Amino acid sequence: MSSKLQISESLYNLHSTISKAITQQFESRVLLTRSYSNAIFLHYRVLYWSLGQALVIILFGIGQVLVMRSFFTSPSNQRSTKPIPMSTTPLHTVSF
């Protein structure tokens, strides 16, 4: 009887150890799946945030170019009908 009791106890210990291993493996897989899905979610958040920042930088650059152009353009870029008189005084030349 003693040997049957030892075999039974050994099988019970083996069963409980395997059950614990299965439970730990399941919990580990659940944690891994959650971590993976969080990583994917974070990846897309970073991607969209970076695209938004790039778009803002491009829009601000275009805005700055337009503002700078407005500083250097005169309201009337057309030629005036009145000619500008040239000076009649002779230019001073240096002779050697």
Image (cartoon, rainbow, N blue to C red):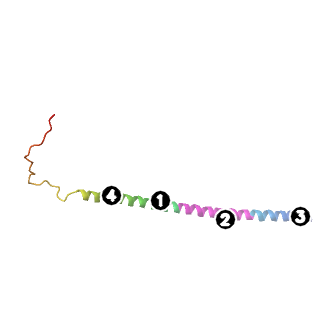
Q: What residue is pinned by disc 3?
A: 4
Q: Is residue 20 magenta?
A: yes
- Mark 2 lies on residue: 27
The mark nearer the N terminus, 3 or 2, is 3
Q: Residue at x 11, y 55 (%)?
A: 80
Q: Circle 3 — which element?
A: helix
Q: CA distance from mark 3 to mark 2?
A: 34 Å
Percent position of residue 61, x then y: 34, 57
Instruction: Say what secondary structure mark 2 lies in.
Output: helix
Q: What residue type is disc 4 on?
A: Ile
Q: Secondary structure at mark 1?
A: helix
Q: Amino acid at mark 3?
A: Lys
Which circle's residue, 3 or 4, is located before the other in the chain?
A: 3
Upstream in the sequence, badge 1 or badge 2? 2
Whether residue 37 sits left or right of residue 47 in the image: it is: right
The segment highlighted magenta reads 19-40
For badge 2, the amino acid type reads Glu
**Mark toward the viewer: 2 or 4:** 4
Instruction: From the image, state whether disc 1 or disc 3 is nearer to you.
Output: 1
Q: Earlier in the sequence, mark 1 or mark 3?
A: 3
Label 4: how many Cα within 10 Å (few below 14, some 14–19, many 20+): few
Q: Amino acid at mark 1?
A: Leu
Task: Kindly identify which numbered label has been placed on residue 62.
Answer: 4
Question: Label 1 crowding class (10 Å Cα cut-off): few <14, some 14-19, many 20+?
Answer: few
Q: Residue furthest right?
A: 1
Tell me where residue 66 appears, x and y as whole percent.
28, 58
